[in-house]
Image (cartoon, rainbow, N blue to C red):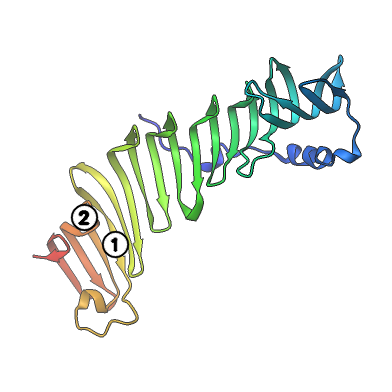
Amino acid sequence: MGCAAPSETEFTPDFEWLNTLCITYENELSIKKSFENEYIIFSGELQSGKPKCGRIDFKDKESNLLYFIGKIDSIINCQLAGEGLLMQAGKKSDIQMRGKIKNSTLNGLGELVQHDSTHIGTFVNGVLVKGCKKYNKGHSVTGYFQNGVKHGICTDQTPTGYVKALFEDNKVVKKLESVKKDENGSYHWIYKGEPTKYSGIKTHTPPESYDGEDKQIKYKWTYSGQFNDNGGEHGKGTLTFENGETISGQWNNGNSL
Protein backbone atom coordinates (compact mmCIF):
# COMPACT_ATOMS: atom_id res chain seq x y z
CA MET A 1 0.00 0.00 0.00
CA GLY A 2 1.52 3.28 -1.10
CA CYS A 3 -0.24 5.64 1.29
CA ALA A 4 0.95 6.57 4.76
CA ALA A 5 -0.83 5.75 7.99
CA PRO A 6 -3.52 8.38 8.62
CA SER A 7 -3.10 11.01 11.28
CA GLU A 8 -5.66 11.25 14.07
CA THR A 9 -6.80 14.71 12.96
CA GLU A 10 -7.96 13.27 9.62
CA PHE A 11 -10.90 11.46 11.15
CA THR A 12 -11.76 13.15 14.45
CA PRO A 13 -15.48 13.97 14.12
CA ASP A 14 -17.03 17.23 15.32
CA PHE A 15 -19.89 16.23 17.63
CA GLU A 16 -20.52 19.61 19.26
CA TRP A 17 -24.03 19.79 17.80
CA LEU A 18 -24.72 16.27 19.09
CA ASN A 19 -23.51 17.12 22.60
CA THR A 20 -26.00 20.01 22.71
CA LEU A 21 -28.77 17.75 21.43
CA CYS A 22 -27.99 15.09 24.04
CA ILE A 23 -28.30 17.62 26.87
CA THR A 24 -31.73 18.57 25.52
CA TYR A 25 -33.11 15.06 25.10
CA GLU A 26 -31.40 13.04 27.85
CA ASN A 27 -33.80 14.55 30.42
CA GLU A 28 -37.01 12.74 29.45
CA LEU A 29 -39.06 14.59 32.08
CA SER A 30 -38.66 17.87 30.23
CA ILE A 31 -40.04 16.70 26.86
CA LYS A 32 -43.25 15.20 25.56
CA LYS A 33 -43.54 11.94 23.68
CA SER A 34 -44.30 12.77 20.09
CA PHE A 35 -44.69 9.23 18.81
CA GLU A 36 -45.14 5.78 20.39
CA ASN A 37 -46.06 2.28 19.29
CA GLU A 38 -45.16 -1.30 20.18
CA TYR A 39 -41.57 -0.93 18.98
CA ILE A 40 -40.80 2.79 19.09
CA ILE A 41 -40.94 5.64 21.60
CA PHE A 42 -39.92 8.98 20.10
CA SER A 43 -39.45 12.42 21.64
CA GLY A 44 -38.47 15.29 19.44
CA GLU A 45 -39.23 16.94 16.11
CA LEU A 46 -41.54 15.34 13.54
CA GLN A 47 -41.59 15.87 9.79
CA SER A 48 -44.64 14.66 7.84
CA GLY A 49 -45.59 12.63 10.89
CA LYS A 50 -42.24 10.82 11.04
CA PRO A 51 -39.32 11.24 13.49
CA LYS A 52 -36.77 13.79 12.24
CA CYS A 53 -34.59 14.84 15.18
CA GLY A 54 -34.58 13.94 18.87
CA ARG A 55 -34.50 10.78 20.97
CA ILE A 56 -35.88 7.47 19.80
CA ASP A 57 -36.07 4.22 21.83
CA PHE A 58 -36.61 1.07 19.78
CA LYS A 59 -35.98 -2.68 19.59
CA ASP A 60 -33.72 -4.24 16.97
CA LYS A 61 -34.37 -7.56 15.21
CA GLU A 62 -32.92 -9.45 18.20
CA SER A 63 -35.30 -7.54 20.53
CA ASN A 64 -32.41 -5.63 22.13
CA LEU A 65 -33.59 -2.27 23.46
CA LEU A 66 -31.64 0.57 21.81
CA TYR A 67 -31.85 4.31 22.10
CA PHE A 68 -30.65 6.93 19.66
CA ILE A 69 -30.25 10.70 19.96
CA GLY A 70 -29.62 12.74 16.85
CA LYS A 71 -30.79 13.40 13.30
CA ILE A 72 -33.01 10.59 12.00
CA ASP A 73 -33.17 9.74 8.30
CA SER A 74 -35.35 6.63 8.58
CA ILE A 75 -36.27 3.65 10.72
CA ILE A 76 -37.56 0.71 8.69
CA ASN A 77 -37.96 -2.87 9.94
CA CYS A 78 -36.09 -2.02 13.15
CA GLN A 79 -33.12 -0.67 11.14
CA LEU A 80 -32.23 2.96 11.89
CA ALA A 81 -30.33 5.38 9.66
CA GLY A 82 -29.16 8.84 10.71
CA GLU A 83 -26.38 10.68 12.50
CA GLY A 84 -25.96 10.83 16.25
CA LEU A 85 -25.46 8.69 19.37
CA LEU A 86 -26.67 5.06 19.44
CA MET A 87 -26.54 2.92 22.60
CA GLN A 88 -27.84 -0.44 23.78
CA ALA A 89 -29.77 0.13 26.99
CA GLY A 90 -29.60 -1.85 30.22
CA LYS A 91 -26.09 -3.28 29.87
CA LYS A 92 -23.14 -2.67 32.19
CA SER A 93 -20.69 -2.82 29.26
CA ASP A 94 -22.68 -0.40 27.11
CA ILE A 95 -21.37 0.12 23.60
CA GLN A 96 -21.68 3.71 22.41
CA MET A 97 -21.65 4.61 18.73
CA ARG A 98 -21.41 8.24 17.58
CA GLY A 99 -21.48 9.27 13.94
CA LYS A 100 -23.04 8.10 10.70
CA ILE A 101 -25.51 5.30 11.41
CA LYS A 102 -26.95 2.88 8.84
CA ASN A 103 -28.71 -0.42 9.57
CA SER A 104 -28.42 0.46 13.28
CA THR A 105 -24.60 0.45 13.24
CA LEU A 106 -21.74 2.75 12.25
CA ASN A 107 -21.20 3.26 8.53
CA GLY A 108 -18.95 6.19 7.67
CA LEU A 109 -17.14 8.61 9.98
CA GLY A 110 -17.70 7.90 13.66
CA GLU A 111 -16.59 6.81 17.11
CA LEU A 112 -17.14 3.47 18.87
CA VAL A 113 -16.66 3.34 22.65
CA GLN A 114 -16.36 -0.04 24.43
CA HIS A 115 -15.37 -0.97 27.98
CA ASP A 116 -11.71 -1.53 27.01
CA SER A 117 -11.16 0.64 23.93
CA THR A 118 -12.28 3.54 21.75
CA HIS A 119 -12.26 3.34 17.94
CA ILE A 120 -12.31 6.56 15.89
CA GLY A 121 -12.38 6.83 12.12
CA THR A 122 -14.17 5.34 9.11
CA PHE A 123 -16.45 2.34 9.67
CA VAL A 124 -18.06 -0.22 7.38
CA ASN A 125 -20.90 -2.24 8.92
CA GLY A 126 -19.74 -1.35 12.42
CA VAL A 127 -16.07 -2.30 11.88
CA LEU A 128 -13.23 0.26 11.75
CA VAL A 129 -11.38 0.24 8.40
CA LYS A 130 -9.30 3.43 8.75
CA GLY A 131 -8.53 5.35 11.90
CA CYS A 132 -7.31 4.89 15.45
CA LYS A 133 -7.95 2.25 18.12
CA LYS A 134 -7.17 3.52 21.62
CA TYR A 135 -6.89 0.82 24.29
CA ASN A 136 -6.57 1.08 28.06
CA LYS A 137 -3.12 1.61 29.63
CA GLY A 138 -1.77 3.81 26.84
CA HIS A 139 -1.80 1.41 23.89
CA SER A 140 -3.05 2.67 20.51
CA VAL A 141 -3.00 1.62 16.85
CA THR A 142 -3.40 4.15 14.02
CA GLY A 143 -3.76 3.09 10.40
CA TYR A 144 -5.72 0.68 8.22
CA PHE A 145 -7.72 -2.38 9.27
CA GLN A 146 -9.47 -5.33 7.66
CA ASN A 147 -11.87 -7.64 9.49
CA GLY A 148 -10.95 -5.86 12.72
CA VAL A 149 -7.16 -6.42 12.55
CA LYS A 150 -4.18 -4.40 11.29
CA HIS A 151 -3.93 -4.58 7.49
CA GLY A 152 -1.91 -1.96 5.62
CA ILE A 153 0.40 0.69 7.08
CA CYS A 154 -0.17 1.09 10.84
CA THR A 155 1.58 2.68 13.79
CA ASP A 156 1.35 0.50 16.91
CA GLN A 157 2.17 2.63 19.96
CA THR A 158 2.68 1.75 23.64
CA PRO A 159 4.06 3.77 26.58
CA THR A 160 7.52 2.30 25.78
CA GLY A 161 7.62 3.31 22.10
CA TYR A 162 6.10 2.53 18.74
CA VAL A 163 6.47 0.49 15.56
CA LYS A 164 5.33 1.77 12.18
CA ALA A 165 5.05 -1.09 9.71
CA LEU A 166 3.22 -2.65 6.80
CA PHE A 167 0.83 -5.31 8.13
CA GLU A 168 -1.08 -8.16 6.51
CA ASP A 169 -3.72 -9.91 8.61
CA ASN A 170 -2.22 -8.46 11.81
CA LYS A 171 1.32 -9.68 10.97
CA VAL A 172 4.30 -7.41 10.25
CA VAL A 173 5.41 -7.68 6.61
CA LYS A 174 7.90 -4.81 6.61
CA LYS A 175 9.03 -2.51 9.42
CA LEU A 176 9.29 1.14 8.41
CA GLU A 177 10.20 2.93 11.62
CA SER A 178 10.58 2.00 15.26
CA VAL A 179 11.14 3.76 18.57
CA LYS A 180 11.76 2.01 21.87
CA LYS A 181 12.10 3.77 25.22
CA ASP A 182 13.31 2.47 28.56
CA GLU A 183 14.38 3.93 31.90
CA ASN A 184 17.92 4.55 30.63
CA GLY A 185 17.13 6.34 27.38
CA SER A 186 15.50 5.82 24.03
CA TYR A 187 16.09 4.11 20.70
CA HIS A 188 15.02 5.48 17.36
CA TRP A 189 15.77 3.55 14.21
CA ILE A 190 14.39 3.57 10.68
CA TYR A 191 14.15 0.63 8.31
CA LYS A 192 16.48 0.93 5.30
CA GLY A 193 15.34 -1.99 3.14
CA GLU A 194 17.81 -4.66 4.29
CA PRO A 195 16.80 -7.52 6.62
CA THR A 196 17.56 -6.72 10.29
CA LYS A 197 19.39 -3.53 9.31
CA TYR A 198 18.14 -0.19 10.60
CA SER A 199 19.71 3.23 11.03
CA GLY A 200 18.93 6.09 13.34
CA ILE A 201 19.77 7.59 16.73
CA LYS A 202 19.91 6.08 20.21
CA THR A 203 20.38 8.02 23.45
CA HIS A 204 21.43 6.71 26.86
CA THR A 205 20.89 8.30 30.27
CA PRO A 206 22.84 6.64 33.13
CA PRO A 207 20.82 5.06 35.96
CA GLU A 208 21.03 6.86 39.30
CA SER A 209 21.99 3.74 41.26
CA TYR A 210 24.90 2.57 39.07
CA ASP A 211 28.37 2.74 40.75
CA GLY A 212 30.36 0.57 38.31
CA GLU A 213 33.02 1.61 35.80
CA ASP A 214 31.42 0.58 32.48
CA LYS A 215 31.50 3.84 30.50
CA GLN A 216 28.53 2.88 28.33
CA ILE A 217 26.40 2.51 31.46
CA LYS A 218 27.98 5.17 33.70
CA TYR A 219 27.90 8.14 31.29
CA LYS A 220 25.37 9.84 29.07
CA TRP A 221 25.89 9.31 25.35
CA THR A 222 24.30 9.40 21.90
CA TYR A 223 24.81 6.77 19.20
CA SER A 224 24.20 7.49 15.52
CA GLY A 225 24.40 4.63 13.06
CA GLN A 226 23.05 1.18 12.28
CA PHE A 227 21.09 -1.19 14.54
CA ASN A 228 19.85 -4.74 14.63
CA ASP A 229 16.16 -5.59 14.92
CA ASN A 230 16.30 -5.46 18.73
CA GLY A 231 17.76 -1.94 18.88
CA GLY A 232 21.35 -2.99 19.54
CA GLU A 233 24.21 -1.12 17.87
CA HIS A 234 25.07 -3.29 14.88
CA GLY A 235 26.95 -2.20 11.76
CA LYS A 236 28.62 1.16 11.17
CA GLY A 237 28.11 3.89 13.76
CA THR A 238 29.49 6.51 16.12
CA LEU A 239 28.92 6.73 19.86
CA THR A 240 29.51 10.20 21.36
CA PHE A 241 29.83 10.77 25.13
CA GLU A 242 28.68 14.05 26.67
CA ASN A 243 32.33 15.10 27.20
CA GLY A 244 32.95 14.88 23.43
CA GLU A 245 34.80 11.55 23.40
CA THR A 246 33.72 9.29 20.51
CA ILE A 247 33.86 5.63 19.51
CA SER A 248 33.49 5.15 15.75
CA GLY A 249 33.58 2.10 13.53
CA GLN A 250 31.87 -1.25 13.27
CA TRP A 251 29.55 -2.61 15.95
CA ASN A 252 28.28 -6.12 16.63
CA ASN A 253 25.18 -6.62 18.81
CA GLY A 254 25.94 -3.58 20.98
CA ASN A 255 29.73 -3.98 21.17
CA SER A 256 32.36 -1.98 19.26
CA LEU A 257 34.84 -4.00 17.20
Q: How far apart are marks 2 and 1 (CA)?
A: 9 Å
Up-down relation of residue 78 to residue 174 (above or below): above
Where, quadrant-wise, is the C terminus in this rendering? bottom left
Residue toward you, 98 or 200: 98
Do callouts 2 and 1 mark residues in contact (Cβ within 8 Å)?
yes
Location of mark 1 (residue):
202
The residue at 60%/43% (across/down) is 93
The crowding category of the residue bearing disc 1, from other C-alpha atoms within 10 Å (few below 14, some 14 to 19, many at least 20), is many
| Marker disc for residue 227 | 2
Up-down relation of residue 96 to residue 71 (above or below): below
The residue at 52%/42% (across/down) is 8
Label 1 residue SS: strand
The residue at 60%/37% (across/down) is 111
Where, quadrant-wise, is the N terminus in this rendering? top left
**Residue 116 appears left or right of 249:** right
Q: Position of residue 72 (x, y in %)?
A: 75, 24
What is the residue that sits farthest to the left in this orientation?
257
Q: What kind of residue is marked 1?
A: Lys
